[in-house]
Image (tube, grey):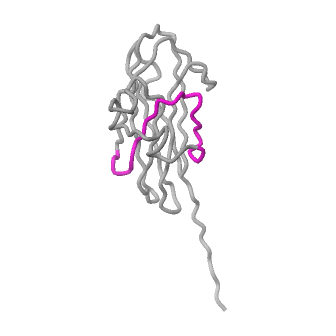
Amino acid sequence: DDDWVTIATAQAFAIDKQILETEIPINGVLKYDLAYGNLGGTTKTFDSIDVFPYNDDGRSPNSDFDGGYNLTAVTPVTSSHINQIYVTNTSPASIDTEVNNNVAVGTGMWSCTYAQIGTSGCPTASQVTAIRITSNSLTPGQYGFIRVELTTHDNDGEETYTNNWHARA
């Protein structure tokens, strides 16, 4: 007669966004980190979308700014984890943050990579409205973050910038 013990491993993948400074100088650089981690279970990849703030975006709190911003940098701190970073200039209100409802990366609105910003057929840094990040395989326990920088302009000091990052593993 044999006795068996079954050990279930929880499947968990987490993402988080951390703003580096809660207040930035007028027309300064807004920096935040997109953190990710495979907390357990099996090897996973992730596909994520970060739609940048836009006026009256319905987020909490609602984004409200007079000027604008340019995408200054997207820097994977652990670059070996990241497969590719894509950019779009699609109207942010029409971008579905559910990855599975989007066209495949490398096609349609997600046909340009970060490295192609400003080249023929791709948006300039001031036109980018969202980024899409795909990862390489992350084994349980692997984690990292991506720093995003937006340089603001023509602000009056009463701005609110809010955005959300969504991912699927």
Quarter of the image where the N terminus is located: bottom right
Instruction: Verify whether residue 127 appears in magenta.
Output: no
The front one of 97 and 88 is 88
Residue at x 59% of width, y 31% of height: 94
Q: Is residue 56 above or below residue 5?
A: above
**How far from the left and from the top, in percent, is residue 159?**
51, 14
Considering every residue shown, the one lying at the far front of the view is 120
Q: 9 left or right of 114?
A: right
Residue at x 38% of width, y 51% of height: 81
Considering every residue shown, the one lying at the far bottom of the view is 1
Q: Is residue 137 above or below residue 146?
A: below
The front one of 139 and 118 is 118
Residue at x 40% of width, y 25% of height: 150
Q: How many marks?
A: 0
Instruction: Verify whether residue 88 appears in magenta.
Output: yes
The front one of 116 and 143 is 116
Q: Is residue 12 above or below residue 84?
A: below
Considering every residue shown, the one lying at the far top of the view is 156
**How far from the left and from the top, in percent, is residue 168?**
55, 48
**How far from the left and from the top, in percent, is residue 157?**
47, 9
Q: Which residues are magenta?
A: 78-101
**How far from the left and from the top, in percent, is residue 82?**
38, 48
Q: Is residue 163 above or below residue 12?
A: above
Q: 102 left or right of 69?
A: right
Residue at x 44% of width, y 59% of height: 139
| Residue 116, image quadrant | top left
